Each structure stands twice: as structure tokens, then as C-alpha cells.
Image (tube, rainbow, N blue to C red):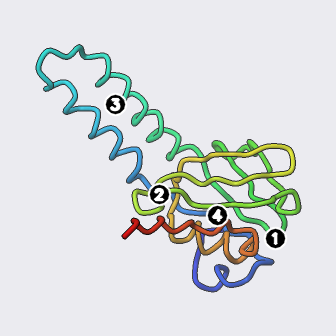
Amino acid sequence: MSINSQTQLDPSKSVVLKPFYRLPLLITLLGLPLLALPGSTPWPSIVVTGFGLFLLIQSFILRVEFTANDLVVWQLGRELRRFPFKSWLAWRLLLPQLPGILYFREEASPHLLPILFDPIALESQLKLRVGALETPREDLPSPPN
């Protein structure tokens, strides 16, 4: 089921997030100008562009589904991993404007996932299902007078 406004507000409904290609395309495009740097080898450009292409492929084959009780990661229609919300201790979106990375901690271990999905829908689903576990963003300290 794709995300829509009706299921977005009902935590008992399953929601699959749409892919979002901005992060992989941004990384791929940032790797290409590295070739133009004077005196540089092509390896940094190859590594950065290759990583961007890897993420682009992942954004085509991975899907994230929010169920009533779990976050489920699917790969080409096959369940790859299930993260039960009852095991979550905290979550936070790091650099959501880029978009960046979803950090969440389960009882067993922490996880970092690149945001390859609609970041607005991701944040709204996280707040709907595990909103109380969101780690607040720390404000930058004020400079001394």
C-alpha cells in the first residue's frame, strides 16, 4: 500500500514509503567534479561516484514499510529485516534537509540508514508510531559574551 493522507494518520494501517532519489543523485554528482581537480588521481571521484550509484540502485530495490508494530525493510519484494517498535529506545533524523540519515537505537544495537525514501513521510510515520522516542536536537551553545 502506498502512502496517502488517509493511511498516513492511522497507525493501524500499513504504509510503504515512496523512494526518494535526491541523496544518491547528490552524492553521484558531487563525485564527478573531483576529476577536474588539478593533480588529483581519479580514485576519489570513482569512490564517491560509485557510492552514489550504489545508493541509487538501493533506492530502486529497497522499500520501507511501517506496519502497526514494526519497521520492515523489503528488497525486491522479499523481507530483508524487521525492526519491532517495542525494541526501539530512541530515533533521530540526522541532516534531514539533505536528506541525510535515520538513526535509531534498538535494545540490541544502534542502526544508521540513509534516507532513500520520502523524508517528510518518513518523519511523519516515525512521529506517529514512535514519536515519544525521538531524541531532541541539541541547540548549538551560545558564544560567550
Q: Viewer-nearest of labels 1 and 3?
A: 3
Q: Quadrant of the N terminus?
A: bottom right
Marks 3, 4: nearer the viewer = 3
User: Percent from the top left, x then y, of residue 80?
Assistant: 74, 42
Residue topped by disc 4: 16
Cα gap from disc 4 to disc 1, whole angstroms = 12 Å
Q: Secondary structure at mark 1?
A: loop
Q: Give the percent coordinates (x, y) of residue 89.
A: 81, 59
Going from N to C along the chain, the mark reached first, 2 or 1, is 1
Mark found first going from the N terminus, 1 or 3: 3
Considering only vertical position in the picture, is 107 above or below 38?
below
Which badge, 3 or 4, is on the more N-terminal residue? 4
Residue drawn at the location 31% of the way across and 16% of the way down: 43
Q: Which mark is residue 95?
A: 2
- Label 1: which residue? 68
CB under 8 Å between callouts 4 and 1? no
Q: Residue at x 39, y 27 (%)?
A: 50
Give the residue type at disc 2.
Leu
Front of the two marks 2 and 1: 2
Callout 4: SS: strand
What type is the residue that disc 3 sits on? Thr
Q: Which residue is mark 3?
A: 49
Q: Secondary structure at mark 3?
A: helix
Determine the secondary structure under disc 2.
Answer: loop
Q: CA distance from mark 2 to mark 3?
A: 20 Å
Q: Mark 1 or mark 4, which is nearer the start of the sequence?
A: 4
Q: On the picture, is 100 further left or further right than 29?
A: right
**Of label 2 and label 3, which has the lower sequence position?**
3
